[in-house]
Image (tube, rainbow, N blue to C red):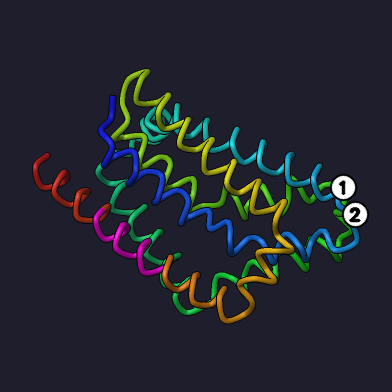
Amino acid sequence: MPNFDSLFNAFVTLLVTIDPPGLAPIFLAVTRNMNRAERKQVSIRASVIGFVLLAVFAVAGAAILSVFGITLAAFRVAGGFLLFFIAFEMIFEKRNDRKEKISDVAITRDHIHNIAAFPLAIPLIAGPGAISATVLLSGSFRGFTGQAALVGIIFVCLAVTYLVFLLAERIDRILGETGRSILTRLLGVILAALAVQFVADGVKALIAG
């Protein structure tokens, strides 16, 4: 069974990568023509789809890498750089701009009934960053117990995301533009540090191998 530090590190990594507070205004934008009941249905469906996708990569991440002949150490380095790029976008607020563009495309194409799958579940919840983080973490959570623990962490992260969607209007009002900007930058700095650690661990493993 993984220790508390590894569990907490995995939780923080996934939660920061998914970035529920950053998704709140996007959720409000893509569901702006819906009532509360419809928004609840969308939030449940998006969270479930996101959970299933990330759980698959948590359980089969190593197998997926082996099919392409990629070592976990190499993926740690590549994934670390990707997460660092996402952190860079968060710090300089480029990620929110990209998310808003994705949400605008979804609305103009009249995907109102399918927004739970696109763009909320994919690529906003289970995007490249979250998938990469999940596969990276799966290397540290081996065996049935480890995989179950990682899937449990994913479930908690998606439960938090679901709650943020339900409370999106209140959260958006409380944080405001300034609060969202400060929180996003703070989470970006944390993710950058975690990304550097992934790269360092990957380089060490490659050298040792």
Q: Count how many numbered circles sit on residues in the image.
A: 2
Mark drawn on residue 35: 2
Please give left or right for residue 194 compared with residue 134 in the image: left
Disc 1, disc 2: CB below 8 Å?
yes
Percent of width and height locating residue 199: 25, 55
Percent of width and height locating residue 13: 39, 51
Q: Residue at x 40, y 26 (%)?
A: 147
Q: Which residues are magenta?
A: 188-197
Q: Nearer the viewer, residue 149 or 173?
A: 173
Query: Which amino acid lies under the numbered mark 2 shown in the image of this protein?
Result: Asn
| 78 w.r.t. 174: above or below | above
Q: Tell me the chief SS of the magenta region.
A: helix
Percent of width and height locating residue 172: 68, 68
| 198 w.r.t. 177: above or below | above
Quadrant for residue 53, please give it: top right
Percent of width and height locating residue 50: 62, 41
**What is the secondary structure assignment of the residue under circle 1?**
helix
Q: Tell me if residue 196 is in the magenta stretch.
A: yes
Mark 1 Cα shell of 10 Å, populated few (<14), some (14-19), many (≥20): few
Please give left or right for residue 32 compared with residue 147 in the image: right
Q: Nearer the viewer, residue 42 or 52?
A: 42
Q: Residue furthest top?
A: 144
Mark 2 Cα shell of 10 Å, populated few (<14), some (14-19), many (≥20): few
Please give left or right for residue 206 compared with residue 148 in the image: left
**What is the secondary structure assignment of the residue under circle 2?**
loop
Mark drawn on residue 10: none
Query: Which amino acid lies under the numbered mark 1 shown in the image of this protein?
Result: Glu
Instruction: For the C terminus, give its image quadrant.
Output: top left
Q: What residue did someone put label 1 on?
A: 38
Q: Nearer the viewer, residue 96 or 62?
A: 96
Q: Tell me if residue 189 is in the magenta stretch.
A: yes
